């Protein structure tokens, strides 16, 4: 199981569920064979003695106490407690329902064994399940039930890697980090956002440091593989020589997947660093959606979205949940409205399109580290954000001419003077359409 868990958390969980099913099915099969086989009860003793006295009850309770003290499931409860969804409701249900179900199966199994075998044979048997099946249905059936038991035994708690305080310990954990710049602490104008700005070199270092804070938090929380996407401007902002050598970096344009290029279903979670609010939001520092120069609105299935929500829907196509984001207060409020359990780090409060009350770079990094660790510790609660296909993508331009020219394509409908509509089969196709509109220039070279 250690090797299986290393492949990935989701895969390991699926294997564990399958092995548990085999275990329960095998036990129920033994019970069924014992009670349904015509010759099963031959030579067996009564399941319950003719008279019950205090001595028998005392012996039963003494045996039960020993079993309870030996059972390490109570300790396991403490280890998995932080990973249970809605623990106030589900813990009592699991304890009462689970213990009750196990007790019923145990009693039925005991009754089945004693229906087939005499007490003396049951007491001396080292492989009671296979002995019961062999006695009731023959040697061939016993071999099959033994094989099923062996397979199911690989999923018992004793074969699992030791649990730690995160759900991903001793398992492969693959994290994707998409990094923008407008949401970085201190950023307020174009002077910090591009190579021509007088503060750009300092702020690309701040951008790198905030990304490093998320990387280090992920590593300390068990991440074994990290991919970082430089998703601002020319896609060549991060100082990659400062990154750990095992981190891979996506840079420059064009690229399939846009700000999420390189993401696929092998990732366990995605994070956002330095994100900003949408172009339809009246608040937010440097708020825009994909193109501040050209686009006034981007909508998925009729709902206006930010870059963060669009990217989260793209990740959802691959069944990857987004668990953390950092940026200004407006951007975080937008994302939290669609992803209530998202962990966020607010780097500044928007005072206007070009003004903010901001944290210092150091304080912002500390806040990102804390929130990113919290996000991974609650990874089990995260759900992918799914947008139902086909995807109706609507784009409103700031000028008339782009909408008019695009309407010449038969696959595109002009909704109004500034807006076009494109029906995509899925989010990757919608992403490619957005990337084409944002990047295409007939003067592109080479």
Image (cartoon, grey):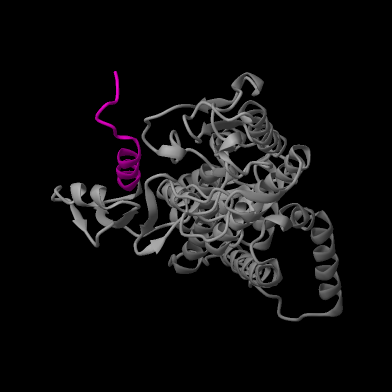
Viewer-side residue, 82 vs 54: 82
**Left or right: 12, with 416 as reference point:** right
Q: Quadrant of the N terminus?
A: top right
* Quarter holding residue 190: top right
Q: Give yes or no for residue 166 being in the magenta stretch.
A: no
Q: Residue at (45%, 68%) from the top-left corner?
A: 36
Q: Residue at (33%, 55%) from the top-left corner?
A: 396
Q: Quadrant of the C terminus?
A: top left
Q: Residue at (46%, 39%) from the top-left corner?
A: 259
In percent of width and height, residue 360 lies at 76, 41
Q: Give yes or no for residue 441 being in the magenta stretch.
A: yes
Q: Is residue 183 visible?
A: yes
Viewer-side residue, 297 vs 215: 297
Q: Is residue 226 above or below residue 380?
A: above
In percent of width and height, residue 331 lies at 58, 54
In percent of width and height, residue 139 lies at 46, 47
Q: Is residue 84 above or below residue 324?
A: below
Please identify the dominant SS of the magenta region.
helix
In percent of width and height, residue 158 lies at 69, 43
Which range is magenta?
428-446
């Amino acid at each position: 199981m250690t090797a299986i868990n290393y492949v990935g958390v989701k895969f390991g969980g699926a294997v564990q569920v399958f092995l548990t099913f085999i275990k329960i099915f095998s036990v129920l099969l033994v019970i069924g064979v014992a009670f349904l086989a015509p010759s099963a009860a031959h030579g067996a003793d009564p399941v319950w003695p003719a008279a019950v006295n205090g001595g028998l009850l005392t012996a039963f309770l003494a045996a039960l106490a020993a079993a309870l003290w030996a059972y390490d499931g109570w300790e396991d409860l403490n280890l998995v407690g932080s990973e249970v969804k809605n623990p106030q409701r589900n813990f009592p249900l699991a304890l009462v329902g689970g213990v009750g179900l196990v007790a019923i199966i145990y009693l039925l199994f005991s009754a089945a064994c004693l229906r087939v075998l005499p007490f003396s044979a049951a007491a001396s048997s080292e492989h009671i399940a296979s002995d019961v099946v062999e006695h009731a249905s023959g040697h061939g059936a016993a071999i099959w039930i033994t094989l099923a038991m062996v397979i199911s035994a690989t999923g018992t708690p004793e074969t699992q890697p030791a649990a730690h305080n995160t759900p991903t310990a001793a398992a492969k954990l693959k994290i994707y980090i998409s990094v923008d710049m407008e949401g970085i602490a201190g950023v307020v104008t174009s002077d910090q956002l591009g190579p021509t700005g007088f503060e750009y070199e300092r702020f690309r270092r701040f951008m790198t440091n905030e990304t490093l804070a998320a990387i280090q938090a992920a590593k300390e929380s068990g991440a074994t593989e990290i991919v970082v996407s430089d998703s601002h401007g020319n896609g060549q902002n991060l100082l990659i020589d400062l990154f750990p050598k095992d981190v891979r970096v996506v840079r420059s344009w064009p690229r399939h997947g846009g700000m999420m290029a390189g993401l696929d279903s092998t990732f366990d979670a995605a994070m956002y660093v330095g994100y900003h609010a949408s172009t339809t939001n009246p608040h937010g520092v440097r708020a825009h959606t994909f193109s501040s120069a050209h686009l006034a609105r981007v909508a998925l299935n009729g709902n206006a979205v930010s870059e963060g929500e669009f990217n989260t829907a793209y990740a959802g196509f691959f069944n990857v949940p987004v668990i953390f984001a950092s940026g200004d207060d407006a951007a975080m409020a937008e994302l939290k409205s669609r992803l209530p359990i998202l962990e966020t780090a607010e780097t500044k409060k928007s005072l206007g399109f070009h003004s903010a009350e901001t944290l210092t770079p150091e304080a912002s990094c500390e806040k990102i580290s804390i929130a990113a660790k919290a996000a991974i510790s609650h990874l089990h609660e995260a759900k992918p954000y799914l947008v139902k296909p086909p995807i109706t993508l609507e784009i409103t331009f700031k000028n008339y001419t782009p909408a008019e020219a695009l309407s010449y394509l038969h696959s595109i409908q002009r909704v109004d003077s500034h807006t076009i509509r494109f029906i995509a089969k899925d989010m990757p196709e919608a992403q490619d359409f957005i990337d084409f509109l944002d990047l295409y220039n007939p003067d592109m070279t080479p």
